[in-house]
Image (cartoon, rainbow, N blue to C red):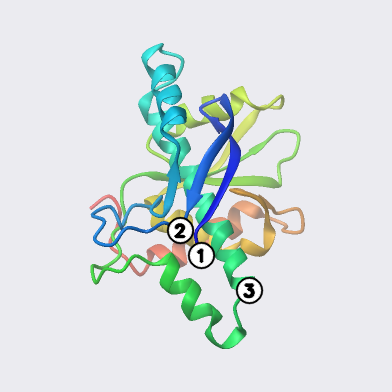
Amino acid sequence: MPSSFTMDLNVAGHRIEKVAMTWGLVQAGDQRVTAASYGTDIEVPAVIELLDLIISGDTSAEEVRDGLNDIATSIIDEMHRENARHLSFDDGLSKVQSQSQPSTSEPLVLDRRWVYAVSSEADPKAIKIGVAQDISKRLRALQMGSASPIELRWSARGGFPLERHLHASFNKKRISGEWFDFRQVTDPVKAISAAARGFLADYPSADQ
């Protein structure tokens, strides 16, 4: 069921308040159905404000693009979980899966984007699992919003498919959005790496 709401956007270290968002207004025949952000819409004035930040040199187009993808995929994950809570056990999983998977017969294709795990020095087991074309740029953007040093803990190529797999694998540890609580895990990096290896083993290398 479509949902409309407002939320504050934090993109590349910049905050835009009370942005109108919509989830679930799927257009039949949409050629972008395989995009990771498919199903999430954002108001045009907020997009213009983001473009102004790019034009002024305050951020890059890549940082804005990756930030919006992160936000959209987090919204999609949350809406799917919300829908699952309102479905019966018998048909719930099939309905959620049909919503979360694009209606396409094409096989899953990994891309060359980096999937990364980062945490702050102050709270090393609260870990963000995200995706970026350039990890160094993403770390700089994340550092702008953190009083504690941000550290890269793990990375691998695999793009949005791998990121979604890791989010699903550690969903019970989710704090909010892309942040996960690994405080009860002895070696978070080992756990993330193992989950990634198991997934990537079924697909050609993202470097190919």
Vertical comparison of 101 with 35: above or below: below
The residue carrying mark 3 is 86
What's the amino acid at mark 1? Answer: Met
What's the amino acid at mark 3? Answer: His
Vertical comparison of 180 with 168: above or below: above
Q: Residue 1 carries which label?
A: 1
Contact, mark 1 vs mark 2 (Cβ under 8 Å):
yes
In this rendering, position of residue 185 left or right of residue 157: right
In this rendering, position of residue 2 left or right of residue 183: left
Tell me the crowding category of disc 2: few under 14, some 14 to 19, or many 20 or more residues within 10 angstroms, Cα based: some
Who's the residue at 47% across and 29% down the image? 46
What's the amino acid at mark 2? Answer: Gly
Q: Nearer the viewer, residue 208 or 4?
A: 4
Task: Tell which circle, 1 or 2, labels the residue nearer the N-terminal end.
Answer: 1
Tell me the crowding category of disc 3: few under 14, some 14 to 19, or many 20 or more residues within 10 angstroms, Cα based: few
Q: Estimate the x, y position of residue 1 in percent, counting from the top left.
A: 51, 65
Q: Residue furthest top?
A: 56
Task: Tell which circle, 1 or 3, labels the residue nearer the N-terminal end.
Answer: 1
The residue carrying mark 2 is 24
SS label for mark 3: loop
Q: Nearer the viewer, residue 67 or 152?
A: 67
Who's the residue at 70% across and 46% down the image? 126
Contact, mark 1 vs mark 3 (Cβ under 8 Å):
no
Tell me the crowding category of disc 1: few under 14, some 14 to 19, or many 20 or more residues within 10 angstroms, Cα based: few
Cα–Cα span, label 1 and label 2: 6 Å
In this rendering, position of residue 29 left or right of residue 8: left
Vertical comparison of 173 with 92: above or below: above
Who's the residue at 46% across and 67% down the image? 198
How many circles with numbers are drawn on the protein?
Answer: 3
Q: Which of marks 1 and 3 is in front?
A: 1
Q: Residue 170 carries which label?
A: none
Q: Quadrant of residue 39?
A: bottom left
